[in-house]
Image (tube, helix red, strand yellow):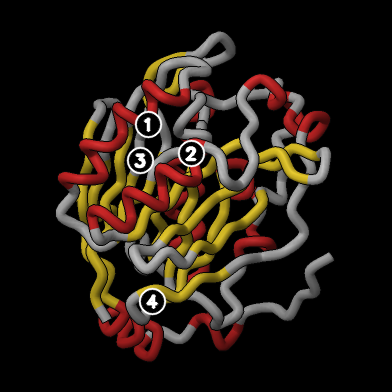
Amino acid sequence: MKVDVAISQVDMEWENTTRNLARFEPAVAEAKADIVVLPEMFATGFKLRPSVVAEPMDGEVVTTMLRWAREYRKAVVGSAVISEGGLFRNRQFFVEPSGRMTWYDKHHLFRPGGEARDYEPGKQRVIVEYMGIRFLLLVCYDLRFPVWSRNRGDYDAIIYSASWADDRREVWRTLLRARAIENQCYVIGVNRVGRDPDAEYAGDSAIIDFKGRTLVDAGCSEGTLTATIDTEQMAAFREKFPAWIDADDFELR
């Protein structure tokens, strides 16, 4: 199976959902891809006061993602601040042209920045199959935790939507490649650029293949780049170099 994936790396206007959605729409519309992946909290910037920007599931962000997927005939992925049952969640959405919507609540909340205080962690790993390819949905800080990301033969690619500050730039770049190499899978990491009141962001969004090779790298500039995921090539490599057979057993807590 082959799927074209676009990564869109853009600066965001702080706490301005309507303006940010308007800014991302051309990137989604014009991407020559089957899937477009956006950063973490792409409509608001990374928020540690969720009540300011949180929306219900039928709010502006989710309804706009549903419209984009339907109108532009491509899947759209990105996270948003969701209010549900009196709790706030950093929720990543995978929205398909059919209207089918899968979501994952960020499990590892960024404790050093206070996210663990303000948000409710997700409890479940989420894998969505689209166009014959299985995607593990993860968000930003999840990248640091290899057990949670571990391939148990149940996915072909990981998608990380992120707002990863530039003072940890090399960590981001290194771990994207580590997750691809150790899991013998594709890794799609989408960060933002620009700044907010708390941090600056260097971008470095990238798509990495199952050997740890960089297919596309956005560097520090705004823009949208596309690469092809080819699961037949990945399967051939995994058969030739079956490191997965020797993986350690583990139990998720």
Lower position in the chain sequence, tag 3 or tag 2: 2
Residue indicated by mark 3: 205
Which residue does the image show at 60% across and 79% down from the upper left?
A: 152
* Cα–Cα span, label 4 and label 3: 21 Å
Question: Which label is found at residue 21?
Answer: 1
Identified by mark 4, the residue type is Ile
The answer for how far apart the CA atoms under marks 3 and 2 are is 22 Å
Judge depth for marks 3 and 2 and give the one in front: 2
Alpha-carbon distance for marks 4 and 2? 25 Å
Q: Position of residue 220 (x, y in %)?
A: 29, 26
* CB contact under 8 Å: marks 2 and 1: yes
How many numbered callouts? Answer: 4
Q: Which mark is residue 61?
A: 2
Using a 10 Å C-alpha cutoff, classify the residue at mark 2 as few (fewer than 14 neighbours), some (14 to 19) or many (20 or more). Answer: many
Earlier sequence position, callout 4 versus callout 2: 2
In this view of the protein, can residue 96 be seen by the observer?
A: yes
Determine whether 137 is above or below 37 in the image. Answer: below
Nearest the eye: 164 or 128: 128
Residues tagged 1 and 3 counted as in contact (Cβ below 8 A): no
Q: Amino acid at mark 3?
A: Ser
Specify which label sits upstream in the sequence, 4 or 1. 1
Residue 251: numbered disc: none
